[in-house]
Amino acid sequence: MSESKQSEARTHERRAPQGQAPRVIAIAGTIGAGKSSLVDWLRHEFQMVPFFEPNEENPYLADFYGDMKRWALHSQLFFLVRRFQIHRQVAARAKESIPPIVQDRTIYEDAEIFAAYLHDQGHIDDRDWQMYKDLYTTLRAEIRPPDLLIYLRCPLKTLTKRIQKRGRSFEQAIPKSYLASLERLYDDWFARYDLSPTLVLETDRLDYVEHLFDRQELIGAIKRHL
């Protein structure tokens, strides 16, 4: 396969009109897709200002993985409010004369993928789900969408290997069925996402950390947007 066709297989772009360079780039993707690694890489490669995912701040997360039904609403409410705060911080920084901002995951994913899955599985009941949706709709109306969304698509087999490798104790017991459901929900969500231009990275076939050719390919794709 030629290099150009390899590139097409690993990156897919939906561009913004010319002259509209993005100030805020969001990285979307499921657990283990490589979001934090990409945020950190973009920070060093393009001197972007990073906003990382608040996983370690969530006091309910370890309990949630041990008992999803008991802690689902608590964990998702924490993420929803904290993510809203991050979006507001990002918007405030974007008004300043600084390099572009890169954000690890969005509020849309929290609500439309993770919380939606938990409701579908019965871990969040209908009454609490309606309250959560009302809160999400209210908060969503107050934030600006990113100028570019980079979606990290990653198959289940690769996800499980990465989760095992990074060794977070509370993640080791995550059921494969949960990861498979998230993978499907992510693809469905991305298919209807229309708030900004997008760039898709097939992260099982694109190693921007270790491989020079893949790194140059990604740099080129980012520069076309910047």
Image: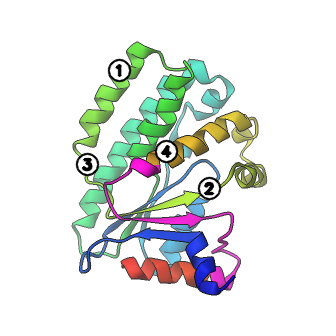
Residue 208 included in the magenta stretch of the image: yes
- Three-letter amino acid code of the residue under disc 4: Asp
Q: As rendered, which of 160 and 82 lies closer to the eye?
A: 160
Where is residue 224 shown, x and y percent of the image?
40, 81
Where is residue 193 shown, x and y percent of the image?
38, 51
Q: Nearer the viewer, mark 3 or mark 2?
A: 2
Q: Nearer the viewer, mark 4 or mark 3?
A: 4
- Three-letter amino acid code of the residue under disc 3: Ile
Where is residue 31 shown, x and y percent of the image?
61, 47
In the figure, residue 178 lies in which quadrant? top right
Name the residue that disc number 4 marks: 188
- Three-letter amino acid code of the residue under disc 2: Ala
What distance separates the C-alpha of mark 4 from that of mark 1?
21 Å
Q: Does residue 174 show up? A: no
Quarter of the figure with the N terminus: bottom right
Left/right of residue 146 with respect to residue 154 in the rendered view: left
What distance separates the C-alpha of mark 1 from that of mark 3?
21 Å
The region drawn magenta spans 190-214
- Three-letter amino acid code of the residue under disc 1: Gln
What distance separates the C-alpha of mark 1 from that of mark 2?
30 Å
Name the residue that disc number 3 marks: 143
Q: Which mark is residue 130?
A: 1
Q: Which mark is residue 33?
A: 2
Q: Secondary structure at mark 4?
A: helix
Q: Are marks 4 and 2 in contact (CB under 8 Å)?
A: no
